[in-house]
Image (cartoon, grey):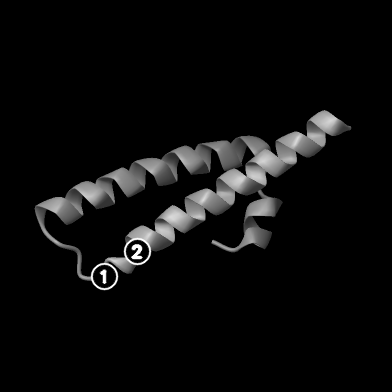
C-alpha cells in the first residue's frame, strides 16, 4: 500500500485497517510455521505496510493535537 493511499484514508478507517492487517500478518506467520509459504516476502511486505500505516497515523494524531 502506498503512503499516498494511506494518507487519503479517514482516521477511523486507518485504525481499523491496521488492526485487520495485524491479524492477517499473524495468520500468515502461523500458516508459514505449519506449511512454508511459496513467497515469504509477503510477510515482510505486510510488516512494512503496517509500520507505514502506524507511522502516518501517529503523524496525523500529532498534527491534530498540535492544532
C-alpha span from label 2 to label 1: 6 Å
**Residue at (65% x, 48% y) in the render:** 56
Identify the residue at horizontal 64%, vertical 60% (top origin).
Answer: 3
Crowding at dot 1, Cα within 10 Å, few <14 / some 14-19 / many 20+, comes out as few
- Seen from the viewer's position, the closer of residues 60 and 11 is 60
Name which quarter of the figure residue 46 lies in.
bottom left
Q: Residue at x 11, y 58 (%)?
A: 35
Q: Residue at x 85, y 32 (%)?
A: 66
| Residue 1 horizontal/vertical position (percent) | 54, 61
How would you rate the neighbour count of disc 2 (Cα within 10 Å): few for under 14, some for 14-19, many for 20 or more?
few
Taking the image as shown, residue 21 lies to the left or right of residue 4, namely left
Badge 2 marks a residue whose secondary structure is helix
Q: Position of 60 compared to 19: left or right?
A: right
Q: Nearer the viewer, residue 59 or 20?
A: 59
How many numbered marks are there?
A: 2
Q: Nearer the viewer, residue 38 or 5?
A: 38
Q: Position of residue 23 (x, y in %)?
A: 35, 41
For this view, does 41 lie left or right of residue 19? left
| Residue marked by disc 2 | 42
Which residue is label 1 attached to?
Answer: 39
Residue 53's place in the image compared with 42, above or below, is above
Secondary structure, mark 1, is loop
Amino acid at each position: 500500500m502506498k503512503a499516498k493511499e494511506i494518507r487519503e484514508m479517514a482516521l477511523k478507517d486507518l485504525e481499523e485497517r491496521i488492526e485487520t492487517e495485524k491479524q492477517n500478518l499473524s495468520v500468515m506467520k502461523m500458516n508459514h510455521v505449519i506449511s512454508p509459504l511459496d513467497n515469504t516476502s509477503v510477510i515482510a511486505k505486510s510488516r512494512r505496510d503496517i509500520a507505514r500505516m502506524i507511522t502516518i497515523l501517529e503523524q496525523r494524531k500529532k498534527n491534530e493535537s498540535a492544532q
